[in-house]
Each structure stands twice: as C-alpha cells, then as structure tokens.
Image (cartoon, rainbow, N blue to C red):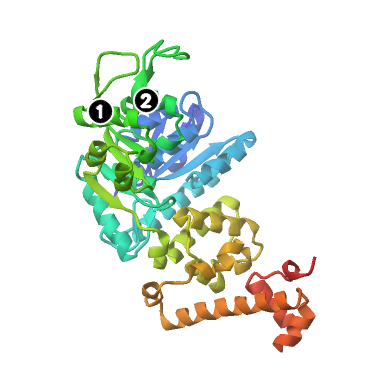
C-alpha cells in the first residue's frame, strides 16, 4: 500500500527538515521553500495532506490553500502560523483548511494533526461515491435523484472540452459545479479563473476579460493581461453571464468562435486556449427575446446545458447538507456538538429555502454560533426557519418521508402554531397560557424553549 503523500511548505529550512524527520517513516514527504514552488508541485499527482506556513514571501498560505482546493478539494490543508496571525489561520479554516499549528509547536502535536487530517480524508473517501452514486460529486452534496442526474451530466461534461452553461437560482451551487467540471477534466492541472460578470463596472468589463494596452484609456498605466489570458490552458468561469453588457457580448462571442482575443487599445489578436464555463440565474431565452442578450452568444454558450435544481425540489438532501455544514462550522468555531435535535432537523427539512444551499449553510453556521447546548436546538435556528409554514412540503416530497417522520413534522408545526396563537391571545402571559393549555408552567416553558417561541415577543408593549 503506497505511503500517504504530504507536501510541507515553509520558507524556513529548519521547519522543512523537522517534518521530514517526524513524518519520514510513515509518509512520502515533499517540501517547498515558498508558496510559488508549492503551487507548481500541485500540478502533479495529488497530495493527501498539505502543511503550509501562512506568511511567506511571494505566494502566501492563502494562495496555496486556494490552489489546493481548486485542483484537489479532497486534499486536507493544515496551516502553520505565529501567535500574531492566529486570526488569519481561523479565517483559513473558514475557507476550507482542516486545522492549524501555532508556532512554536511540539513535533508530536504536528504529527498528530497530520494523522488526523489524513484520517479525515480517508473517512471522506469511504463515503464519497462516483458521479452515479448517491451522496456527492466533488464538493457538491446530495443523494436525491435530481442531484444524481446532475452528477452524471457534470461527469460527462468533464470529459468533453466544450463550453458549458450552468443555470439555477442563486445559491444552488453553480460555482461548485464549475469547479467540479474543471477538477475532473484534462485541464485540472492548470488554473481555474472565476469572475462575476455582474460585479464588474460596465466600463471595465472588457478590460478585465481581454486586457488592455498601456495608455488605452485614462488610468491604463501599463500592459494588463485579461482573464482569458490568465486562464490560458485552464478554465474561465463566467458567473452571472446574463449581466454582461451587450457590446462586450459581441466580443465574447468572437473570442469563443475564433479562440483569440484582442486587448483594449491593441490591433493585433492573441490566441488563447481557455475552456469557458458560464453560469446564470436568469432565463437567457427570455433575455434574448427581450433584446438584453445576444441570440448568437446564447447558442454558443448553450452547447452543454446543466440545470441545478433548487433546494426545495430536493429536500431529502437537507439532512446530509445540514450535517456537513454542522461539522464544518463546529470545527471552525471550536464547538463539540452531537448533531441536530430532531425538531431542528424537521424545521430545516420543512423550510422552503428561497436562498437555497447558501441560505441553509448560513442558517446552520448561525445556529452553531448562537447555540449553547450540546446539539443544535430548534431555538438556535433563524426565526424564518423555525416558523417554516411557508415552506410546507409538497406532496411528492412528503410522500418520500417515512410515516413516523411525516407525522412528527406535522405535529411540530401544529404545536408551534398552537403556542404562538396561545401567547398571542394571552399577551405572552405564561401562567395564564399554562392554565389554558392544561399544562404545568414548567412543562409549557420546556415546550416554548423546544420550539423556539419567546413569550416576551407576545407581551403587550
């Protein structure tokens, strides 16, 4: 069985020698004296664990982290940091790092962190199926029939060096899908360059995409390479392509057709080899009909369309997603949590999620941050989620639940509705509410806490 591959990145030679010494017997250890060299090494066979210093000349630890996650998201990253930059290390964990070592550290601690990171990777590999499987593809999670169909399309797109158009509501994971295609493609060793077309000022879009010559316009002090050139040999992800101004759409269409671009202020063309993946939350056919999007560009982009389903159409994936987000944010915030209370999980499953997976992650992160128990309780969730009546399950989703879960979900909703109505009627008076309900006051308090209902919210002002 091959030894696990570990890459250690630090500009201090003594740190590199230390890791070679403490890991050498059980691991295949490679070293890099700076981030730039490390990023170059990532283009080869993937590593199981990368240990990188945070502050280095040239490319720093954040750049190494981003490069690792772009090329091989399953690789675990451990950051090394001095006391003064611990907060930066925590931010790196938010961005996907597994853990951090604070310098100076004990060699045994370093060895243990690497072993834990490797074990975490192994556990993930054990449950990560192929695209036709049940639970995940790259960083996308979900075992619903809708997501399994998406995984199969993404896997097929990965093997075809053609333009892909991803569509779906905000928060459905379009950038994750684009990164999955890149990571499984023949271009995975080269750069993945992402840009949100809607976030670029209209007057700078052309310059950002295609670059500009010195003096091309006021403020153009030097030659600038555009994003097409930055992504040469790799993948260019154009998010929110529907927001691109019409004049730039003309030039983008030509770039896709001719596989060459022209910098602003130059007359000559430059050949580029960048695979384009575009994404939008808009109905581009409707945009074409309204004259806001060029028809020729639409058909050039729509070579391989993939639609990502909204979360409300795959609610059976909510428990898996919520569990993954809980593990992630509990680790980042240093909390030991047993999981989600049944009432909390039912509330998450019953909510409509207009913001889709992104909103779900935000809700779980908030719950981990504000909660104080050993599990995420219903009261820890945002008010909109706790009261998710607007997100009542459609018949087809309800029918996929076991009978017991469906009944418990309905009971939770009715119970919370009853508590809200009771306190509204009695102006938040818990004693009178307990009498009206025929419950002991302590029992009513437990119900209020369990269902996230605050009596103070209903008291007369």
**Residue for point 65% across, 58% down:** 370
Whole-Å distance between the Cαs marked 1 and 2? 12 Å
Residue 218 lies left or right of residue 293; in this view the side is right
**Residue for point 47% across, 58% down:** 354
x and y, in percent, of residue 119 in the image = 42, 54
284 and 170: which is toward the camera: 284
* SS state under label 2: helix
202 and 341: which is toward the camera: 202
364 and 24: which is toward the camera: 364
User: Label 2: how many residues lie within 10 Å, few (<14), some (14-19) or many (20+)?
Assistant: many
Give the farthest residue toward the front: 290
Q: Within the image, what quadrant is residue 240 found in?
A: top left
Identify the residue under disc 1. Answer: 255
Q: Within the image, what quadrant is residue 268 found in?
A: top left
Residue 222 seen in the current view: yes
Q: Is residue 87 above or below residue 311?
A: above
Residue 381 seen in the current view: no
404 and 81: which is toward the camera: 404
Dot placed on the residue nearer the N-terminal end, 1 or 2:
2
x and y, in percent, of residue 13 in the image = 48, 27
**Residue for point 48% across, 82% down:** 407
x and y, in percent, of residue 93 in the image = 52, 45
Identify the residue under disc 2. Answer: 206
* SS state under label 1: helix
């Amino acid at each position: 069985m091959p030894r696990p591959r570990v890459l250690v990145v630090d500009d201090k030679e003594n740190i590199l020698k230390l890791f070679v010494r403490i890991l050498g017997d059980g691991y295949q250890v490679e070293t890099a004296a700076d981030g730039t060299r490390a990023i170059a090494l990532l283009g080869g066979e993937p590593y199981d664990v990368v240990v990188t210093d945070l502050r280095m000349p040239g490319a720093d630890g954040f750049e190494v982290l981003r490069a690792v996650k772009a090329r091989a998201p399953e690789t675990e990253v451990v950051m090394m940091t001095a006391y003064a930059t611990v907060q930066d290390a925590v931010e790196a964990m938010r961005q996907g790092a597994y853990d951090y070592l604070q310098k100076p550290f004990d060699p045994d601690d370093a060895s243990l962190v690497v072993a834990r990171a490797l074990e975490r990777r192994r556990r993930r590999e054990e449950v990560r199926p192929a695209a036709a499987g049940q639970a995940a593809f790259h960083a996308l999670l979900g075992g619903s029939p809708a997501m399994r169909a998406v995984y199969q399309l993404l896997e097929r797109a990965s093997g075809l060096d053609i333009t892909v158009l991803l569509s779906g509501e905000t928060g459905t994971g379009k950038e994750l899908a684009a990164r999955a295609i890149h990571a499984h493609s023949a271009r995975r060793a080269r750069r993945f360059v992402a840009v949100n077309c809607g976030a670029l000022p209209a007057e700078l879009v052309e310059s950002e995409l295609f670059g500009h010559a010195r003096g091309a316009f006021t403020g153009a002090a030097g030659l600038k390479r555009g994003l097409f050139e930055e992504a040469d040999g790799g993948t260019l992800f154009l998010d929110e392509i529907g927001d691109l101004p019409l004049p730039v759409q003309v030039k983008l269409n030509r770039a896709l057709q001719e596989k060459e671009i022209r910098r602003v202020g130059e007359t000559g063309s430059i050949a580029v080899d960048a695979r384009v993946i575009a994404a939008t939350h808009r109905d581009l056919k409707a945009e074409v009909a309204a004259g806001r999007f060029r028809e020729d560009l639409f058909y050039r982009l729509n070579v391989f369309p993939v639609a990502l389903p909204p979360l409300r159409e795959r609610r059976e994936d909510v428990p898996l997603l919520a569990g993954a987000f809980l593990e992630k944010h509990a680790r980042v915030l240093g909390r030991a949590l047993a999981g989600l209370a049944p009432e909390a999980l039912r509330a998450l499953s019953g909510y409509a999620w207009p913001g889709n997976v992104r909103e779900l992650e935000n809700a779980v992160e908030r719950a981990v941050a504000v909660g104080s128990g050993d599990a995420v309780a219903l009261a820890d969730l945002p008010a909109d989620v706790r009261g998710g009546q607007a997100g009542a399950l459609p018949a087809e989703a309800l029918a996929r639940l076991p009978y017991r879960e469906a009944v418990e979900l309905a009971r939770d909703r009715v119970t919370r509705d009853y508590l809200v109505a009771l306190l509204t009627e009695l102006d938040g008076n818990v004693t009178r509410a307990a009498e009206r309900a025929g419950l002991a006051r302590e029992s009513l308090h437990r119900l209020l806490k369990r269902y996230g209902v605050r009596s103070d919210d209903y008291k007369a002002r």
